[in-house]
Image (cartoon, rainbow, N blue to C red):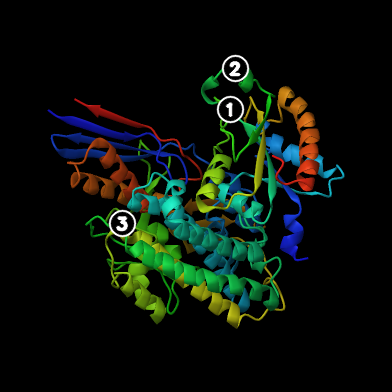
Amino acid sequence: MTALGKRAGKVLVVGVGNPDRGDDGVGPMVARQLREWALPEAVIMERSGDALALMEDWAGHEAVVLVDAAAAPGGVAGRGTVPGRVHRIDLLEDALPPGLSLSSTHALGVAEAVGLARALGRLPGCLVAYAVVGEDFAPGAGLSPAVAAAAEGVVARVADEVRQLAKDPAHA
Amino acid sequence: MATRTIRVEAIARVEGEGALDLHVRDGRVTRAQLRIFEPPRLFEALLRGRDCTEAPDITARICGICPVAYQMSAVHAMEDALGVTVGGPLRALRRLLYCGEWIESHALHVVMLHAPDFLGYPDAIQMAREHGDAVRGGLALKKAGNALMRLLGGREIHPVNVRVGGFYRVPAKSELGTVAEELKRARDIAIETARWAAKFPFPEFERDYEFVSLRHPDEYPFNEGRIVSSRGLDIEAREYDGEFEERHVAHSTALQSVLKKRGSYLVGPMARYNLNFDRLPAAVQALAGECGLGPQCRNPFKSIVIRAIEMVYACEEALALIAAYEAPAESAVPLVKRAGIGHACTEAPRGILYHRYVLEEDGSIREARIVPPTSQNQLSIEEDIREVASGALELADDALRDRCEQTIRNYDPCISCSCHFLKLAVHRE
């Protein structure tokens, strides 16, 4: 089997975010915790979320799971934007929940990566995001209590998702 | 009295946070200001007291797009202060690393940030639907540049392998061979990208700039050369402070540079090209001709074609450097710390980047001074906007705003990193 073939059989998990920006660090935190699980089906990465790098990362993978913080710009109120709330989003099918943004403050982010990959025909067969609503993105801060509590549940859900996708990449 | 104000609250598709204010009264542009409101970053102050060997890694953090430029100006300035010269394969590896940065930086700007202006798209994602091959090409070019940065620098953003005196680790010749194949493909893509960009509609616009760049006896400049201009300047880096000065202006947290005797000037690809056309290989010169460029170009909107030509050059040069490379026995030359003053200028993708350091006896930094290309181009950008807008006042506000933003993007300004949120306020009386 070629290197690419081996990779294609594995589910890519990308923890997206900046560990030095408060709740934006939830993606990398989940990725680090997942490494301690026995998950031979997964390739696990931590990334800043740059759109072009994400597209390179998922090339060759049938199934990709992103874990990212979400922001509710402008203080949109509602159950879906409560800090710590976790949304599972099929990025190939679903729109983002109202009031939420996965845009990076720093570069082209996840939303742009999906848009660009769609335009170029470079989307993986399955692309799922776990978006954790954050509340504090201050430089140097750690995770807020609500997001830290949610992260544990996300780790377990992503592990389940990876096992299912490894059996059936089309299940999403 | 008819007053018209065009305000771009945050300029998109540039590195950093800036805004534009354009004031028009009675059919005349009365003020064009590029407002840079990023907080000061204080790098020069935080370098004080650090060891001279730390400067390349600290200053690399100034920019995620052109960290190699900061590392190169830092190591050359420190070597100047310590009386060290780096030659042979180590010097060649530095040029090779710079090739990687030019390729990835220019590919991002040409295809993803600037091309949409000419083709009438709001961004590269919209453009990708109809120009998929060009965007795929741009991504492949960026990837090839990144591969060089990763191989020589340890990673593509903020590389960690550069040190005063050379590198921490040098690659074996066989390692460079794998990148060479990718670079050959990149060269072909860069040629196609130049041909693609050459067909864009360019506004008829020229200005009589004073171009400033490095000039080397026989190379298109990256790391070394005298600082020359199209109006006769011809100095060593150590004479920079005698000819140039930085001024504070109220509307910008970035200092504006001027030539003391003549005022504004232009650095970057168009300046390098005009002052060093004769240093390009014949095949690259011929490609420039095919793309409608003569040895001189004064239309800033055509800088996108020049950037593409420079990508072709950087691929060619990288391949030549790899072919000639033999790994050196030592990865760096030894240093003896001493007190001294060091100066250096190297060619960042956006133009000359000047560093000056004063070192204490123990090699710690007493003073640091860094003049990046964008602060040198600020005044030229404002003058361009004033002229471009004066000739386009018949346009509606939206179209005029777009033309002004395109004018700013001609410079690929690196205000620092990020920014996508655009608001426009139009004020009429």
Q: Quadrant of the N terminus of chain B?
A: top left
Which of the two marks, 3 or 2, is nearer to us in this view? Answer: 2
For the residues labelled 1 and 2, say whether their Cβ atoms are less than 8 Å apart: no
Q: Mark 1 Cα within 10 Å, few/some/many (few <14, many 20+)?
A: few
- Please state if B230 lies on the left or on the right of B107 as rendered: left
Q: Mark 2 Cα within 10 Å, few/some/many (few <14, many 20+)?
A: few
Q: Are marks 3 and 1 on the same chain?
A: no
| Element on which disc 1 rests | loop
Residue tagged by mark 2?
A78
In the rendered view, tell whether residue B421 sits above or below residue A84.
below
The chain containing the residue under callout 1 comes to A
Q: Mark 3 Cα within 10 Å, few/some/many (few <14, many 20+)?
A: many
Of residues B140 and B66, which is closer to you in this image?
A: B140
Residue type marked 1: Pro
Of pointers 1 and 2, the one earlier in the residue sequence: 2
Residue tagged by mark 3?
B301
Please provide percent x and percent y for residue B6. Answer: 28, 35
Please provide percent x and percent y for residue B15. Answer: 47, 46
Please provide percent x and percent y for residue B43. Answer: 55, 46
Please provide percent x and percent y for residue B422. Answer: 41, 35
Residue at left offset 42%, top offset 78%: B217
Residue type marked 3: Phe
